[in-house]
Image (tube, rainbow, N blue to C red):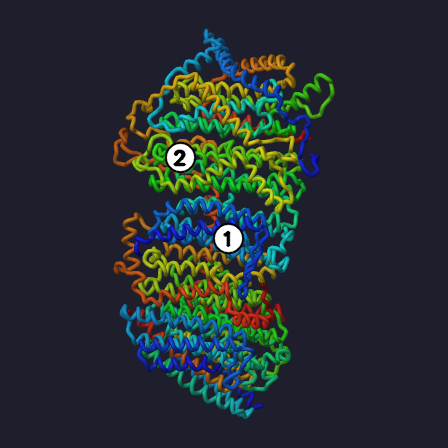
Amino acid sequence: MLMEKIAELFIILILVSVVLNVSSPFIKFAIKLYSFQSLMLALYILIGAVHFNSINLYGSFVITVIFKVILIPYFLFKTLKRVKMDKEIDMYIGIPEAVVFAGSLTLLSNLIAQKIVTAGITFGAFVFTISLATFLIGAMLMITRKTLFSQIIGFLTIDNAIFLAANSITHGMPLLVELGVLFDLFVSILILSILILNLKRSAAA
Amino acid sequence: MYELVLILPAVALIFSVFTDVLLMSYLQLIISTFVFLTVVAISLSFHAITVFFGGLFFVDYINLVILITVSILELFVAFYSFGYVRTEIKHGLSKRKFKFYYFWKNLFIFSMMASIMSNNLGIYWTGLEATTLATALLVSFNRTKESFEATWKYVIMCSVGIAIGLFAIVILYFTTSQVYGESMKSLSFINIIQAGSELDKNFLMLAFILALVGFGTKVGFAPMHNWLPDAHSQGPSPVSALLSGVLLNTALLGILRFYQINASAGIYYPRYFLIGFGFLTILVSALSIIKQKDYKRLFAFSSMENMGLIALGFGVGGIAVVGSLFQILFHALNKGALFLSSGNVLAVTHERKIDKIRSLSKHFPVTGLMLLFGVMGISGMPPFAMFLGEIYIMFGVFKTNIWFGFLVFLLLIFIFAGLFSKILKMYIGVKDGENGQQNENKADSGTRKGKQNKGEKEIHPFMLYVPLILLLISSILLFYMPSPFLHIVKSASAEFGGKIIF
Amino acid sequence: MTKILPASFEVHINDMTYNYNIQHIGIGIFQFVIIILLSPFFAGFIHKLKQRARGQKGISIFQFYINFNKLLKKEIVLSKDATFVSNIAPYIVLVSYLVVLLMLPAFYRYSLLGISSDVILVAYTFALSTFFMTLYAMDQGSAFGGLGASREWFLTVLSEPSLIFVFISLAIYTKNGRITGIFYFIQKEVSNTFLSGAHSNAISIAIPFLLFVSLFIVSISENARIPIDNPETHLELTMFHEANILEASGKHLGIFEYGSYVKLTVFLTLMSLILFPYMAVNIYQVPSALAVYFLKMMILCVFIAGVEIFNPKMRIFRVPNILSVAFILSLIAMILSIRGF
Amino acid sequence: MNTKYNGIYRYFFGCLSILIPAFFIALSFYDFKQEFIIKSALLSFSFKFDPLSVFFVIFISALSVFISIFSIKYGDKYDKKPSLFFYSFFFVVSMIILVISNDILTFLIFWELMSIFSFLLVIYEGNEESRKAGFLYFLMTHIGTVLITASFIMLYLKTSSLSFDYYKGTAGVIIIAIAILGFSIKAGIMPFHTWLPYAHPVAPANISAIMSGIMVNMAIYGILKFLFIFSSGGGAFLGIALLTLGALSALLGIMYAMVQKDIKKLLAFSTIENMGIIFMGMGVSYWAKIENFKSLEYLAMLAVLLHIINHGLSKSSLFMGSGLIDKYAHTRNMERLGGLSKKMKQLSVLFLIGVMSISALPPLNGFLSEWYLYISLIGSVFTGNLYMVYFSVIAIALLSLSGAAAGAAFTKLFGITFLGKPRTVNAENAVEPHIIERIGLALPVLLCVFIGIYPYQIISALNAVMFYLTGGTVSVNPLSAVQIIHARSFSLYAPGLIAIAFAAVLLILFFYLRAFSANKKRIFETWSCGLDEKNSKAQYSGSGFSSSIMKVFSSFYSSVSEINFEKDVKKYFRLKSVYTEEINDIFEKYLYIPIGKLYLKLSDIFNVLANSENINVSLGYLFLSLIVCFVIYIFIIR
């Protein structure tokens, strides 16, 4: 019971970090938030692992921490340093509106979750709501922000949302698959970083 | 034998790291030929679904069709690359860059093969994402601002799309794990199909929708298509050929797998989604194609159209499935020919704009004619095999609804008009301008950047013959289709409830 | 309107079979020759009438015979640019009129070519003559030739449909496609109505009247008479027909002139047949039929002369107005004759 | 490529395109009911010689033999690019195979091959003009093919068979209508004709001859097949529609032909006219078939079949003639020609006969088929059917108008080109074409004369085709009198008799005049109003010739004309003034260009919407479509 409450806390923190991300124009902060958010996700997985005592989930926890909490933020920071750009200035909608929008997306995802989960499925509407909301807010981030970094952050947020869903509705994907997924994610971040550098260079030229 | 299809590209991948480019181009020829021969051997001896590598990979009739397509196109692209590398190096590109080219290309082929043959949906996903990543740096091969932008768009959109696809797999996994428990087995396609009727239908539908939108992004369905014209037009031409000809089909395979699973559970709604997206894609392509200014973008839109048509074919079912399966192969051949011959023009002129290229009939007689014939082929005209695919699909569409059939035909006419007007302008057009003499000069400087009298002779003969042979094969296939292939298509279409007439 | 013809449209008039016997051929040749001989006379007669009406003394009625004879005696002056067309065109023009004449049952039912005297053939034979006349005009490379050819075709394009319509209306009205058959039918109906007093549905006064008016307008345009053309001037602004044969001389001019007389006669004959068809069916009726024919022709000549006297020549682009009247009249006639079923 | 041996291709393919058609002729004479199937792995190509196919095979083959004989010499102009001979050979062969193909796919494949080869020939010259023509041609053809394909697909769905054998009497009204629409595009019938006047002139002359004389008739073949074999009966209005379309094309086609300056363009428009005439015949015939007026059906069918032959013969000979003019006088513009008759005596005689034949002047063949059409139109008036009566009355009016206009147009063509003074140096320096070229041209012309005077043979041969299509025949009289049994007493045209009468009267006249007139001749210059006699400018020009007719029918044309004076010249003494006249097609101006503009506008808007450069918008679409799919899933499916 307690574990469930703690898990819920972690989940809520994920959502909070995403909303914070929406409200902040600073990219460095956003990367830190992402790292934090991934950590929450990892901890949530860890609770699951302890609860079900599943090796699979332990493994999942470890690789999540390695890739999402450490490696990806590290590379993003490195890229950011080379690009020398910290503040998001190009947005289609202002921050206050975006936050209100994020709130309403959360409401919407709650609505959808209620609608879907009526079928009496084992996992809770709560987790699904949060994961859907994270997904939608991530999408919103990608749509409304013009800077390349924000898009990466949005993409990573979406990815986290899917991971959250994957680890809540099931007890994690098979480890091999999860490893592959995370590795792909990592490589894609690498490639995106390279692209950012190149784009910056070609724009300067 | 089956393992070879995966191992050989991996070997090529390893070689490409160590060997010199020119040597690598020979090695690539050999390896691609062997891959092709292996696939031929597989298709000649193929009887039933075969599993290998501990159940992680399998070959059935459906992915065998795509496998054949990939191996044929890969073979030709290898031959083309042989000439391409030499021509570009002669024009001053560094060898190191081409080493890089071979590395990423082989990685791309490897991950695509893995993706196609994967039994496990997780591996399918991983492979598909890997293809995105492997081709990303190929798309930005030219290192121009446009190519980086295109790559950015490509990676971001496809990654998001495939992430949504992952969501679909998660939900599917959740559904199947109710039957098989949480293990690799729940992701194994063969097992899922077997348990089809026991699965929760709501979640299967949800998974299908997510997969459709997610993988559909990679297929290039409208309105998620925006990355496609940019990415396909920016890469080196052999890569564009592969992207357009086979990668799209690989992504489509994912949707088809979900479709099959739904069908095995007795859910038939997905076909309307396929029809809808297919039609929308054709519509978008039809209305955009006339406004394109870049000839490779033109072909990219045509790929979209054909993907739409294939999806439409699978959606309407029946005879059209056969058409769609044919179309997968024929489109690859034809589109390969188009991209490769446009690569010839690009390699000499370094000009992507349609307006800058004129009078190909004079400077590029063979290439120009191939482009012209390619456009005819891609629009489904005999003597090219796509005629067969298209007419099969249209049989199915007309069977669904006559007026819908006419609508699709109308859009196809628009697409043909767009493609054809541009290509014909390039083939024999004269540059717009005030008077003739000035035109000539402008055209010369525009087309050849001051290099006088340089046309088709500039390029390696392989680059000329490969598209020609592709078109020839396409033409021969209309009149004579090898019976093993026919058998494979027949059996594959039977899995979707299709049947072959004639 | 109902379908009265169940499965085919055949219309039988029993005595339309042609068996050429010596009598038919003989009288046919006689008819042919006498109309050829008479035709300059009719033209001269109209000319004379016009001149008299204007208060002039005028030429002799037989002046055109003299002219023709004189022209035959003269030498031909050919243009340097003339080709073979100039040498054959005059003959073909005249011959095509003569062939039409061969088909016409002017006063004897069995004309020589009566078996093949199809109305459309007649109309297209006229077109053949126009074709060659205009080619002749263009052959010499003179400025007026082209002008004449252009105007001639302008008139033909406008009047040919009317002519064909008149013919086809007649054909539909009488349910017969041959000129010989058409006029024999009218003759029979008229005689039935007037002589035996039998009431016939088929006969109508309105249709022949409309067709007569229409044919009259067409004749005026085809034969280059006032108010459409003035055959007596050689003023370039007014020339239609004359411009075509401006370069002709000697024998060629003679043939062309004679051709125009024959054409006029053909049209007058056609009108006379619509006006009051009276054709001999055997050798004993021939004299009376000939007399009636001659009388009718005289009346028509007076009529034509009257029209020519009382009308000024029109501007060229007013011609379509009057020709369209002819066309519409023949169209009405055709509709009426369909109603007659 | 070594230019020395280029002639080899010409001779090789020239001989091939004589031998292969000749072989097909022999084959069709050998056995009328031959059927064979060639099976490949998937497709089976089935072929069948039915009477209709045999008719077309002989027609195509014979004409292409003539044209090939002609091209063997004429083609030396094109030796530098021998692809011409290659393409034209396959063009002909694909047409021959097209008419004997007996299933959907074979038909479509060879139909498209025919289109592709003809397209390649249209763009053969490779200039801007040919690009425009080629584009328009291939696009329109493609639209036509799509419609034909659609109708075949519908037929397949109805019968679930691909073979034509099973289609007898199955096609409903919609299927036929769509097929006719598709074929009309190929035939160049009026609202769909726009490609024809562009495509026919730009191709080399022998190709124009094939396209205009043979290829357009393939559309007629298709329509005949649909109307008289596949049709399940019903849809009499289709007949009326065909009649109306045909009448419209006949009139407008020749009206446009009249105002052209380019010889080949004039001929191309005349092709539209003749296709219109054929359509009128088919319309009447089909209508009569549905309403069960048997004899009318036969008559109109005879008109159609005869007109196909007549038009093919005369049009191909005229196109060959135009090619020779182009080759030896170096221009096709009538305004720059003139007086060719003196230099090319034999050609001008042949051309004159061709011109007479196509303007349907009596003793020649053109009149024969037109006469049959008139008779069948009159026949349809006699039926008393409420609609048909009025439509055929209108058709008669338009046909007669177009007949007269054809006379005018071809007088212009012959008169301006061959007669008068040479207008340019080129025209002055023309020489008589090579003997082989003249032979190739003379053969169809002689056939024209033969058919015109002695049609007994050809009509009795056509009876087999007619019997196949309509189940009835028209009886013919060996004494060259064409007699119609069912309309026996209605009318009769005896071409032989008329020809004899012509000859007899001509001979009598000739000998009479020879005996009674002076036979003196003097050659002198034409008086040209006191100007310099050498001045050829005093002659009437081609545009002048047609201007008065154009003025009366001005509503048919949308013409723009202007006179430009040189700017720096004093007001009263102008040295030079330029008169330009542009005659546009009303359909092109008010139908096709607006449609094209609409499409461009639509795709402009659409491009902004769908193909945004902006990645945010693209991502927006991605998520939007996901949400839409969700909504559909949640609210509709569940």
Q: Taking the image as drawn, is residue C305 in sight?
A: yes
Mark 1 to mark 2: distance in Å? Answer: 39 Å
Image quadrant assignment for residue D282: top right
**Chain of the residue on which disc 1 is drawn:** D
From what the image shows, is residue C199 above or below residue D283? Answer: above
Q: Where is residue D374 in the image (x, y as percent from the top left)?
A: 58, 34
Residue D348 disc label: 2
Q: Position of residue C310 (x, y in %)?
A: 50, 15
Q: What element carries label 2?
A: helix
Residue nearer the viewer, C180 or D474: D474
Q: Position of residue D89 (x, y in %)?
A: 43, 52
Residue nearer the viewer, A31 or D429: D429
From what the image shows, is residue B29 above or below residue D435? Answer: below
Same subunit: marks 1 and 2: yes
Q: Is mark 1 on a helix, strand or loop?
A: helix
Residue at position x 46%, y 47% from top? D64
Q: Where is residue C235 in the image (x, y as percent from the top left)?
A: 39, 19
* Other residues around mark 2 within 10 Å, as few (<14) / some (14–19) / many (≥20): many
Q: Which of marks 1 and 2 is in front?
A: 2
Residue D143 disc label: 1
* Dot placed on the residue nearer the N-terminal end, 1 or 2: 1
Would residue C26 appear left or right of A84 to someone viewing this image?
A: right
Q: What residue type is labelled 2?
A: Ser
Q: In which quarter of the image is the C terminus of chain B?
A: bottom right
Q: Which amino acid does label 1 sit on?
A: Ile
**Chain of the residue on which disc 2 is drawn:** D
Residue D510 disc label: none
Q: Taking the image as drawn, is residue A154 in sight?
A: no
* Other residues around mark 1 within 10 Å, as few (<14) / some (14–19) / many (≥20): many
Would residue D567 appear left or right of D549 to someone viewing this image?
A: left
From what the image shows, is residue C159 above or below residue B361? Answer: above
